[in-house]
Image: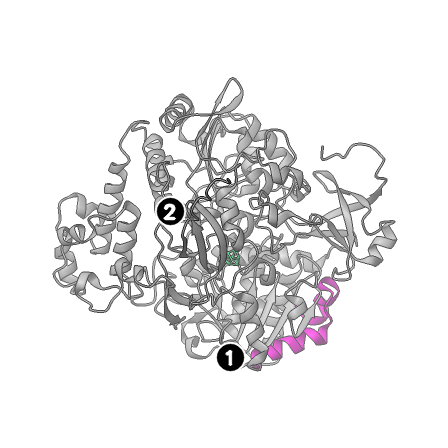
Amino acid sequence: MSPPKAAKAETQIHYRTCPLCEATCGLAIEVEGDRVVRVRGDKQDPFSRGFICPKGSTLGELHHDPDRLRKPLVRRNGRLEEATWDEAFAAIEAGLGPILAEHGRESLALLLGNPITHHLAPALYVGPLIRACATRNLYSASTVDQMPQHVVSGLVWGDPNAFPIPDIDRTDHLLMLGANPMASNGSLITAPDFPGRLKEIPQRGGRLVVVDPRKTETAARADEHLFIKPGTDVFWLAALVQTLFEEDLVEIGRLERFVDGVEEIRELVAPFTPERVAPICGIDAETTRRQARTLQGAAAGAVYGRVGNHTVEFGTATAWMAAILNILTGNFDRPGGVMTSSPIASRIDDGEPGGRGFRLGRWKSRVSGHPEVNGEFPAASLAEEMETEGRGQIRTALTVATNPVRSYPNSERLDQAFAELDFYVAFDIYVNETTRHADVILPPPSTLEEETYELTFMTNAIRSFAKFGEPIFGGEAPTEADLFARLILVMRGEGATADPASVHDELLKDAVGRSLGASKAETEAGTEPGAQANAKGEKGDLEREEILAALAGLSPVEKLLDLKLRTGWQGDLFGRRPGGVSLAKLAEHPHGVDFGPMVERYPARLKTASGQFELFPEWLVEDWARVRARLESPDASGGLLLIGRRHIRSNNSWMHNVGSLVSGRSRCTLLVHPDDARRLGLENGSLSEMRSGVGILRVEVETSEAMMPGVVSLPHGWGHDVDGVRMDVAVKHAGVGSNILTDDRVIDTASGNAVLNGIPVEVLPVDFESGPSPNE
Ligand code: SF4
């Protein structure tokens, strides 16, 4: 007799938000017992409309990945071994304490990665962690790919975090440069189902124009694709601006009296005629003029430039010209143009135009004197700060959800620098190319064990939307908020055994004080915040005690989130605005709640000191000298230029341990135009050797008509077959790390951003039998 079959666990469906990229798609996660059995797009999610990409469907695989760390690792006798949480925090205290005591806070580097912005607890606790570390050696993904936009947003309209979001649902003309949302699903814009939304542009009579050195998946869908030489977008955009002036097409519209510097811009771009820039960019003058006229003539148009625009030598100047175009064509803060989001977990009472403005360069890096930007130093300068001896040398590091040895330029040099740190703490779910050097690794819980709310990305969203999800699984490990709180306590010197609840209470106290309109100082001095609120009138008789009582029983992150929601522009103000939003109300709507499209926020949102759009800030004008010099003596070498590329099944370096995403033929190939391949003696499937100013690697060639002749493309984030990595699947599908070739000595000086596109390279044929790869 066969044994009776075990009863099948009941299937439950949980509706959550995908945390893997900026698109924030709604997911329907089917669970049986403690297993995820299926993940689909949530058709009832009003924002993402059922869309899901291949990565989202693997969330269960990621959760169950045996290589995902569940317990801390501590280095003992040279080897990373499992330890208890208390042992791990004790090891951090013991390792960091003497170094900080002897060499000071500047001997510590704090490095922050993208996933912080996708998770609720890190988004709420990262600010206090930065303050607790108390070091100026702060690095993040921002100086890898987006700092130019922060600089332009900060200097031109006064808020470095107010990005110009193309209103793709209402635009009639989208001019897109250096972006491939068909693969990335959008960057510095949250628009789930980007492919569907792009398809709707021509359906309503609009146009999509893509400018890119590769005919990308997005370019293939466009009404028009223009090849452009990598790194030259700034010249082309300047020529569009020049055409607007020359043909008398400048029409700013509603915001005109708030715009300063138009005549200065006219003079600045005067030499950048379409004819002059044509040989530099590879786009003929008549096409350039036609594009300027079409953009200006559209009822509502938007210029959107992303990674390919920002990760180049003139990244900030490029972002500046894109902003100028949007303003001069009247498309800034216009439905269908570029707008800014109104997240419901924030207030939108912008007040009068004007603010403190944006300051940068307040301090400088030790070795090369790079100015801080948004409180950070360039990722490209990290290795020299670690290597160069003397007071202030970085001797210890804390990395949070980041893999700089794969994502920062000149990765071989940085790999060596990490290996030589005195002590290194990583907060990460994998032992990867960077964390293999750690002395302690703290793994956060799986995303399915945490509350979900997209706090960060709703600030870039094309619609105001809110969705909350409770943890699907209970874990034995500490919550992510507890881990951050314990790290904060250790960094402050309060000890490895201090109670994390003290940090949770402190953050809540500060948040309540802020939401009531009281300054922290007043709160500490015992001023009744309620009195402040009463004075403002908005919150009636709201009192601290009432708020704390209403939040009782929630987890620490839920308290902070509920407070933001209830005091946000759609909030219920703790019962004073009937029908308003609270966490409890959101929980009744598992598919999320839509609050409509972006709305006009300017001029009230202008936070420059003048209360104007400052089109001609000194910082950008000084930087323009580099662009002008290149116009006078363009690069005439005619050599090959390397660009990166994104694939829909990949997400930088960290989704490569998911078998179903990396199966099949290798996607880590060098795309080469067939004419270049013939000239260089390369064949489809052959091995090539690539050389740049800093490194050499070998990679398989894939010939492709999609490439602009003279340009080759290699994806980033690969190169997993190095000693110590504990990601079995990734190691078997290792690929090569493109940042072996990128040069950390060349940066966009106005923002400190790394240069990852337009890298001069040589590509040579290699016999498969000719010996070991230089990557090994
Ligand atoms: S596009 Fe894919 S990875 Fe991004 S949020 Fe949607 S499902 Fe997740």
Name which quarter of the figure residue 127 lies in: top left
* Percent of width and height locating residue 502: 24, 37
* Percent of width and height locating residue 405: 58, 37
For image coordinates 25% across by 49% down, the residue present is 554
* Percent of width and height locating residue 110: 45, 37
Q: Of 604 and 308, which appears nearest the observer?
A: 308
What's the magenta bit mostly, secondary-structure-wise?
helix
Residue 635 highlighted magenta (yes or no): no
**Quadrant of the image for the C terminus?**
top right
Residue 273 highlighted magenta (yes or no): yes
| Kind of residue indicated by mark 1 | Glu
Name which quarter of the figure residue 155 lies in: bottom left
* Percent of width and height locating residue 463: 42, 68
Callout 2 secondary element = loop
From the image, tell me which residue sits under label 1: 251
| Kind of residue indicated by mark 2 | Glu
